[in-house]
Image (cartoon, grey):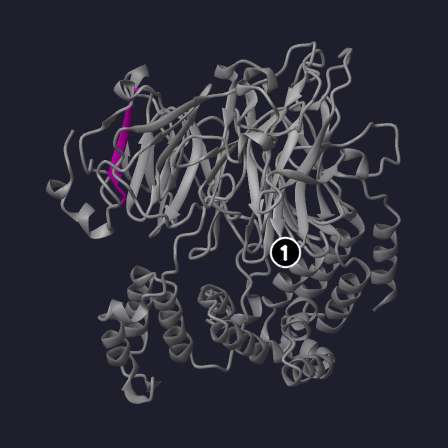
Amino acid sequence: MNRSARMLLLGLLTIPAPGVLAQGGAAPTVTVETSTTARRKIRLAEVYLKRQDWSDAISLLRRTLDDHAGDLVQVSPGRFLETSSRINRLLVRMPPAALAVYREQVDPQARRWFESGRSENDTAVVSRILVEAYPSRWTDDALWWLGEQAWKTNRPRRAARYWQQLLPPARPADSPTTRRLEAGGRLGFPDSRHPEADVRTRLVLCHCLAGRLDLARIEWSRLKRRFPDARGTLAGQRGNLVALLADWIARPELWNNLSSPAPHITFGGAIDRNGNDAEPVDPGAPLWHASFDESLAAGPSHLTDRHPVIVDNLLFVASSFGVYGWNLKTGQPAWPADTATGTAASAHLVYPPGPAGPPVRAARQRSGHIVTSLVVAGERLYARVGSPVTAQAAREPRPLHHELVALDISGGEGRVVLQVSPTVIPVNDSRGRWSFDGTPLVLNDRLFVTTRRGHPQAELGIASLDADSGQLAWHRRLASAVTAADQTTNIVTHNLLASSNGQLLYSGDTGVVARLDPATGSVAWITSLDPPTGSGPFCTLADPDSDLLLVRTANDRLSALDFGDGHVAWSRRLPGRIDHLLGIRNGRAIVSGHSLWALNISSGRIAWQRLAREQHQHGLGRGLVASGIVYWPTRERLHLLDLDSGQPLRQPVRLDVRGCRGGNLVLSPRGLVICGENQVTVLGLHGGLLPNHQFDNPASLPRR
């Protein structure tokens, strides 16, 4: 490195590194802690690359990766990438001459990682190459081998993610020596030696095994267009790959990889918040109704939104200060009366155990709706119990407490086995204690929960806790947001995490979206968008096929973010308020609010919509998607619509004559659960369980 360059670098490194504003002029203003030093080193390396000073550029980038591992750098307004991700995206866009210099330096170490990991069948060791030496020549073999391991363990979507990175990148019109060096876009290996036809053949098989024959046909069409004469071996047969794959795609019965429907264990069905494959039902007459004991609610019923879960033959619903349980078939208490809390009014109360004193409610006004949700993991039911306030008003006179609890719902009949206070998160400054901002998400032996503190400047974070002891494993601050909230008002929020492809996904009411590693809490990227409106809960919806994350922004806008680096793939405004992201099926994202929409997840284009013109036609509660059926509740009707066309599959189910109104829906083998305002209702199977093929013919459905 010459003297002038060293002086320039020294000057850059002596400048302090404050937090970086993610957006300006809009509320809230979000600030993310970044490494300005790392960003300036990267900028200097870009200068070297433009001068074709490959040696100095690569040396500086490698030192930056070592010195700033885990740090975030700003790549554009509102977008922040982890240093290694930013540097790898820069390195893979280097011209061949620069790549040769880089590989001469890193290939020996990358080879040792690959050979050691492969010999010991250790995917973690091999994956290290993807983080610390992605442009290395050995990444080519690492991606191929990691894809094979995922395929062998029946994880076709993960295998496809590895193999897709081996496809040749889109080439700009200019020459290789002036190839663009931007940070955006998906990370891909620049010059794989694996034949593209072989890679695309494997992608077709991955889509087939994942049950997405529509995507398999699209990938097959690309193979046919680009390599019509490619030959290879498939299932012991050698021949033209296009013809061999056509035979397999034409036999969907060979790819029946469907497992039994998963139970509805948390908000959105499962921890990916993308529902489950429950058997669709044709709702009939009510089996039973039940009202909630309002003594444990933090507010009136019309300002409370409850999301139930189902475990075997039991139904659980949380109120702010308690948890209720019913026998799904009979409506009786979840467990015999002698284990309940005493009176008939509290017979369905699972938590708190009696006798319990009256709850302490906030004295000052609260913001927005109160939302409650639950999560089931193993033999435990987890809930956030206590005041829904996550940031106290300046003059709130009452102590507002809450905690996370775990109840044994297998042999313990609701016995408390874990209680965790937010004080488990240490406070090393004067800004006050943290709050648990929603119900936890459970992965293996860890609890993950969003956190929040401060008012009107809010700090946002995520905590990882041991599921057995409640001890803190790590706590990660994501960002701070200056909101427009009134300091005399208590803030009520309910932000939830999601999980996809082994990663944590955060999307909150401030517009902050982030992806994290659950093992370490390291942040892969943060993107700041316009904050969503409404009551929540707020969480992202991941599509494993397109690698896009769907999030709510503003009042009527959706954005799709790339899973890899968080850039906005598309954004669009809908004609009406958005409240719920119901699910993504067969490339369609189902979104509801006042109206109902189906969008193409890859482009954001509206496939169909049902616009509500009158207030009584507005959606009321969270609907669901089961197989190819969309269930959409309004105030007095429940609509059953075809996922592909949006057309009604039967006359709307009259809720008003069944003694209930629209609400949050959950499907079960016993019937359809509707939880709205102060009542839970189970509609029986008057029409029965209906296999998918019966929905293909509306005339086969009973009309009422």
Locate residue 168, reporting x and y percent: 47, 71
- At horizontal 43% and vertical 23% (from top left) the residue drawn is 290
Locate residue 597, reporting x and y percent: 33, 35
The answer to whether residue 557 is visible is yes
Q: Quadrant of the N terminus?
A: bottom right
The answer to whether residue 137 is visible is no
By secondary structure, the bulk of the magenta-drawn segment is best described as: strand
Give whichever of 288, 512 is nearer the camera.
Answer: 288
Q: Magenta part of the protein: which range?
A: 636-643
- At horizontal 42% and vertical 29% (from top left) the residue drawn is 578
Residue 665 quadrant = top left
Question: Which residue type does callout 1 highlight?
Answer: Asn
Q: Tell me the element at label 1.
A: loop
- At horizontal 48% and vertical 33% (from top left) the residue drawn is 326
Q: Number of numbered discs present?
A: 1
Locate residue 20, reporting x and y percent: 73, 39
> From the viewer's perspective, is 444 left or right of 670?
right
Whether residue 638 is in magenta: the answer is yes
With respect to residue 374, does 472 lie above or below? Answer: below
Residue bearing mark 1 = 444
Whether residue 295 is in magenta: the answer is no
With respect to residue 108, does 221 lie above or below? Answer: above
Locate residue 545, reporting x and y percent: 42, 57
Neighbour tally class for label 1: few under 14, some 14-19, many 20 plus, Cα within 10 Å: few
Q: Residue furthest left?
A: 699
Give whichever of 169, 548 is nearer the camera.
Answer: 548
- At horizontal 31% and vertical 36% (from top left) the residue drawn is 631
Give whichever of 399, 197 is nearer the camera.
Answer: 399
Residue 83 quadrant = bottom right
Q: Quadrant of the C terminus?
A: top left
